[in-house]
Image (spheres, helix red, strand yellow):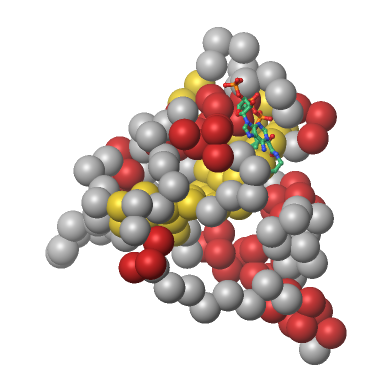
Amino acid sequence: MHSQPGSMTLARTYEVRRDDGFVASDDPGRLDLDVVHGYLARSYWSAGIPRETVERAVRNSLVFGLYSPEGQVGYARVVTDRASFAYLCDVFVLESWQGRGLGKWMLEALLAHPDLQGLRRFLLATRDAHSLYAQYGFQPLGAPARFMERHDPNVYQSQAVR
Ligand SMILES: CC(C)(COP(=O)(O)OP(=O)(O)OC[C@H]1O[C@@H](n2cnc3c(N)ncnc32)[C@H](O)[C@@H]1OP(=O)(O)O)[C@@H](O)C(=O)NCCC(=O)NCCS
């Protein structure tokens, strides 16, 4: 989304296509929320996440869908000011499509997004995919002692019983 003061806000879609029919797109309206919520709710990092939380995060993030000709097969989300900082999260390729280069292709398309250029810092957290992100310049924190967090790993479980 790009806007200028005093002008109408124009939504422009960023899309990358492959000859074999796969598409990566930042169009939130194209997402299959059943696929996105279905995966995230069974992922190791957001097990049990309510659908409403997924929808709110989609509305307020730069989101990426990866599409086969049959439908959505992957997803990634970037929390960003589109100027200086970004945080990459919720990256997945559906199980039956993994291991054939699609995750790397989706990441390359995402990292080439015009709103994600010239950032001062691009963060992510991962349990075991460090060597994937290292291929795109991500490194362990240079000064971890400078970072702090408030982390509530059970927050979605407590929301579910409310
Ligand atoms: C991680 C994920 C998005 C990668 O997508 P993919 O289409 O399966 O992966 P690709 O075929 O594009 O290749 C991934 C590359 O990263 C490497 N890699 C490193 N850690 C990995 C990991 N935990 N899972 C998958 N690949 C990993 C692979 O070895 C491969 O390296 P290569 O350059 O030698 O081919 C996908 O496997 C996935 O959704 N995994 C489960 C969810 C998850 O862990 N998400 C990441 C959270 S940070």
Report the residue at 55% width, 27% height from top.
Answer: 104
Looking at the rendering, which quadrant does residue 108 occupy? top left
Residue 83, image x, y percentages: 25, 54
In this view, the residue in front, 27 or 158, is 158
Q: Is residue 150 left or right of residue 2?
A: right
Foreground: 46 or 63?
46
Q: Is residue 29 visible?
A: no
Q: Is residue 95 visible?
A: yes
Using the image, determine if residue 7 lies above or below residue 108: below
Q: Position of residue 134 (x, y in %)?
A: 47, 34
Question: Which residue, as the protein is rendered here, is positioned at the far bottom?
Answer: 162
State the image quarter where residue 151 is shown: bottom right
Residue at the limit of the structure toward the top, as seen here:
19
* Quarter of the figure with the C terminus: bottom right
Above or below for 147 versus 119: below
Q: Residue at x 70, y 50 (%)?
A: 36
Between 99 and 74, the residue placed more toward the observer is: 99
Residue 93 in the image: x percent, y percent?
69, 36
Q: Looking at the image, is 64 positioned above or below residue 149?
A: above
